[in-house]
């Protein structure tokens, strides 16, 4: 099956050709006809399998047909996503696929001034890609009307329907027409969330690809057992062994991210950090520069674990083992995108072993173990260029910084 065989507008086919999308991925093959027919869909497919285009292609087609038929200008589709970076990225995909149509997509997210967003809305938008908080603000202020919306999409659906977002979403859903098409997309989902998703739709949902092991088939992932205090030396070694590779390092907290950056700086390894404490413009710029290859090493918290599509990340390092098993799947899924292969390695300390077990039971198989023999291990420590090997004081510093950050957070609330 080729895109040419679909009943979609020639303008969209032309842009797909330009994007070098020759044939649909499995999930696109299954989802596009359903969405075109107006069905509600819950689509579960592994990371990097092209879920964005699976909803963008048919939705742009429908909106374009509506415009050609002379339907009034109004927001016809809302895509809900969990992070600002993802809102920007997905709006970009829509605009690329819709570049030869007159369908206009904009992103609406928090962390930046709302005036420019309002200005864009005034000019007219057919599709908006949003984070729920800012959408809710603009709906309440009357800048966004959702009464003509035909399709609502939840990307990273399990995360969007989870506790943190649910209240915002329930408030928003009241503003949407009852008669609408609802689509859910994610690489991971659990039974509770699935039930919740069903409760939001009228028509029976079609469930698509749902593999038992949700880790992308394109990712070769493994774990190495390393003491907490030695992790930075192994990161140093990995970077030195792969000098030309793009490496994405995930850590548990913002404080840890800054720590790792500092440790790398002592080893003369340039790296940049991405986490929720950074100013939004900085966040987008850092991500853009990592995408563009100006930075080879990005140290990030889980704000970047979901959905972010950087085509040539070679290595994902789980510097800390995530405490939510799904997060492991999403983190390693930042590599091995589309038809590329990728590698991921997790650094697991003794105290993190229960977290690793939880991940293994979630993905229904053990994670391959990288055997580091004693000599290799001691060599790695011996060859470090880190001059500050007083790790005990480093660790103490880190603990204090984390405590201070927690205190600050509590005060904010
Ligand atoms: P997912 O949301 O499933 O994690 P994305 O939608 O972000 O995946 O797509 C992953 C990558 O695959 C993107 O870089 C995208 O450009 C690419 N891609 C999507 N569909 C196709 C296709 N049909 N042919 C080639 N590449 C594709
Ligand atoms: Mg996605």
Image (cartoon, rainbow, N blue to C red):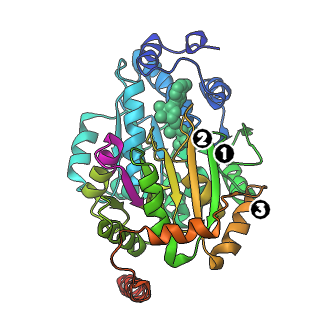
Residue 276, horizontal then vertical, whole percent: 37, 65
Residue at (50% x, 55% y) in the render: 305
**Disc 3 element:** helix
Between the residue at mark 3 and the residue at mark 1, the CA separation in whole angstroms equals: 31 Å
> According to the image, label 2 marks what residue?
182
Residue at (21% x, 47% y) in the render: 116
> According to the image, label 3 marks what residue?
361
Residue at (34% x, 50% y) in the render: 287
Q: Is mark 3 within 8 Å of ligand 1?
A: no
Q: Is 223 left or right of 233, judged from the image as shown?
A: right
Residue 207, horizontal then vertical, whole percent: 73, 39
**Crowdedness of circle 3 by 10 Å Cα count: few (<14), some, many (20+)?**
few
Which numbered marker is on residue 201?
A: 1
Residue 88, horizontal then vertical, whole percent: 36, 44
Residue 71 in magenta? no
Task: Tell me how many marks there are.
Answer: 3
The region drawn magenta spans 287-299
* Residue 300 sits above or below residue 13 on the image: below
Q: Is 48 left or right of 137, judged from the image as shown?
A: right
* Residue 4 sits above or below residue 347 on the image: above
**Disc 1 element:** loop
Between the residue at mark 1 and the residue at mark 2, the CA separation in whole angstroms equals: 7 Å
């Amino acid at each position: 099956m080729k895109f040419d065989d679909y009943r979609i507008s020639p303008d969209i086919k032309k842009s797909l050709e330009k994007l070098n999308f020759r044939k649909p991925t499995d999930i696109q093959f299954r989802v596009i006809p359903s969405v075109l027919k107006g069905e509600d869909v819950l689509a579960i497919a592994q990371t990097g399998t092209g879920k964005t285009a699976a909803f963008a292609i048919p939705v742009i087609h429908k909106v374009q047909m509506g415009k050609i038929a002379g339907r009034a200008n109004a927001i016809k589709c809302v895509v809900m996503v969990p992070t600002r970076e993802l809102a920007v990225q997905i709006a970009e995909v829509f605009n690329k696929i819709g570049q030869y149509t007159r369908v206009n997509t904009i992103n609406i997210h928090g962390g930046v001034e709302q005036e420019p967003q309002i200005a864009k809305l005034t000019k007219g938008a057919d599709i908006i890609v949003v984070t729920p908080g800012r959408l809710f603000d603009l709906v309440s202020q009357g800048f966004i009307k959702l009464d003509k919306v035909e399709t609502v999409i939840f990307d990273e659906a399990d995360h969007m329907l989870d506790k943190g977002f649910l209240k915002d979403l329930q408030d928003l859903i009241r503003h949407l027409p009852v008669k609408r098409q609802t689509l859910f997309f994610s690489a991971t989902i659990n039974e509770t969330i699935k039930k919740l998703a069903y409760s939001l739709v009228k028509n029976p949902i079609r469930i698509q690809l749902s593999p038992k092991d949700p880790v992308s088939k394109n990712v070769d992932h493994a774990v190495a057992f390393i003491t907490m205090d030695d992790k930075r030396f192994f990161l140093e070694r990995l970077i030195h062994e792969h000098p030309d590779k793009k490496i994405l390092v995930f850590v548990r907290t913002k404080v840890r991210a800054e720590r790792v950056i500092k440790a790398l700086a002592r080893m003369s390894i340039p790296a940049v950090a991405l986490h929720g404490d950074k100013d939004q413009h900085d966040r987008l710029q850092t991500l853009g520069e990592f995408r563009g290859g100006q930075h080879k090493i990005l140290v990030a918290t889980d704000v970047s674990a979901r959905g972010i599509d950087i085509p040539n990340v070679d290595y994902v390092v789980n510097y800390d083992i995530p405490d939510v098993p799904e997060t492991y799947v999403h983190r390693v899924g930042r590599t091995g995108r589309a038809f590329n292969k990728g590698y991921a390695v997790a650094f697991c300390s003794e105290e993190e072993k229960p977290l690793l077990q939880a991940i293994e039971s979630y993905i229904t198989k053990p994670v391959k173990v990288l055997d580091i023999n004693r000599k290799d291990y001691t060599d790695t420590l011996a060859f470090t260029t880190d001059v500050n090997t007083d790790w005990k004081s480093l660790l103490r510093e880190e603990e204090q910084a984390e405590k201070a950050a927690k205190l600050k957070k509590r005060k904010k609330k």
